[in-house]
Image: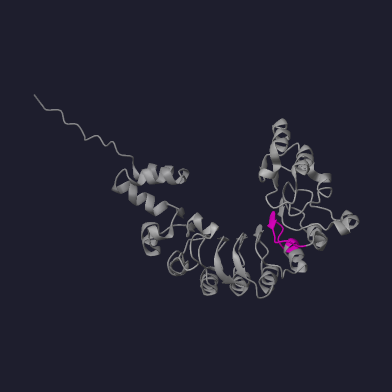
Amino acid sequence: MEERRTAPFNTGMPNAVLKCVLPYLDGPRDRASISLVCRRWYELDSASRKHITIAFCYTTTADRLRRRFPAVESLKVKGKPRAAMYDLIPDDWGGYVTPWVQEVAANLDRLRWLHFRRMIVRDSDLEVLARSRGGVLQALKLDKCSGFSTDGLFHIGSMCRELRTLCLEESSIVELDGQWLHEIAMNNSVLETLNFYRTDLVQVSFEDLERIARNCCNLTSVKISNCEILDLVGFFRAAAVLEEFCGGSFNNEQSDRYNAVTFPPRLCRLGLGSHRMPSVFPFASLLNKLDLLYALLDTEDHCLLIQRCPNLEILETRTVIGDRGLEVLAQKL
């Protein structure tokens, strides 16, 4: 009797199918699980992973990152632990971006988005980054970083002409002049997010801000350091599509002059840096996000403002809101 021969049954997923599925799996935990299934899945994950977060810069090396994920497009590297925010870690502790910048400059050709958090950045690092990736870099975030000055930002402004996001929030920056912002105003027409909120950058030309608003038709988010709101009248007039603004301050001694300030029609996310609320009341019904962390408001001020924000979805504030403020907030949910 002739023996029946059957073809071996392959339970593995074909490479073509897996390559179609992987782009829809962006979650880091999902990707980590996939890379542990087998060697083939590990290699496919390595070749296709685009977004990488290094939770602690000393857990790996920049060279190993490049060998493991050669196609990375977005990289976030965290340095000092959160204890650094409370002065529990010395300034010379470490967390330098230099090896990461050098690897990006030399080998990571596809990288478009770069985010450093609580790390030490030198002006030379920013110059290397601007010269090597200036033509393709779309997002640069230096979040709570230190060690650099406006000279380093000058290189970014003059050479990174495709930059859509520049975030310097809460970074310690040595301010030498305001030429860095002028370079952005003269060279960039695609900027969407500009953020130097909670920094000591005060040598800001309001003409440059206005020029950026005119040149960048997709500018939707601007967060700046404290300045007089009256100096931003031209900027607000030019920023027709602005949706988010933080910074600036009101002076009660000039209260009668604030009627000249007209906020952009699409503004729906606002961060206050003062205690003058009447200027906000006319468009409060349009707001869905309020940042009151640094506003000089008491409990009753919170209540008055929240009551005028029927569409509020996100509220960032401090315990000064009190039980009364929370009660008013709960009534709106």
x and y percentages locating residue 40 in the rendered image: 31, 48
x and y percentages locating residue 159 in the rendered image: 60, 71
x and y percentages locating residue 171 in the rendered image: 59, 63
x and y percentages locating residue 197 in the rendered image: 66, 59
On screen, residue 71 versus residue 150, left or right, reads left
User: In terms of depth relative to the viewer, which is nearer, 271 or 76?
Assistant: 271
User: In terms of depth relative to the viewer, which is nearer, 293 or 201?
Assistant: 293
Q: Residue at x 48, y 59 (%)?
A: 80
Q: Residue at x 74, y 61 (%)?
A: 213
Q: Residue at x 81, y 45 (%)?
A: 283
Name the quarter where the N terminus is drawn: top left
- Asked if residue 33 is among those painted magenta in the image, a careful observer would answer no
Whether residue 16 is visible to the viewer of this picture, yes or no, is no
Q: Residues in magenta?
A: 213-227
User: In terms of depth relative to the viewer, which is nearer, 209 or 320?
Assistant: 320
User: In terms of depth relative to the viewer, which is nearer, 180 or 298?
Assistant: 298
- Asked if residue 222 is among those painted magenta in the image, a careful observer would answer yes
Whether residue 80 is visible to the viewer of this picture, yes or no, is yes
17 shown above or below 63: above
Q: Please identify the dominant SS of the magenta region.
A: loop
164 shown above or below 307: below
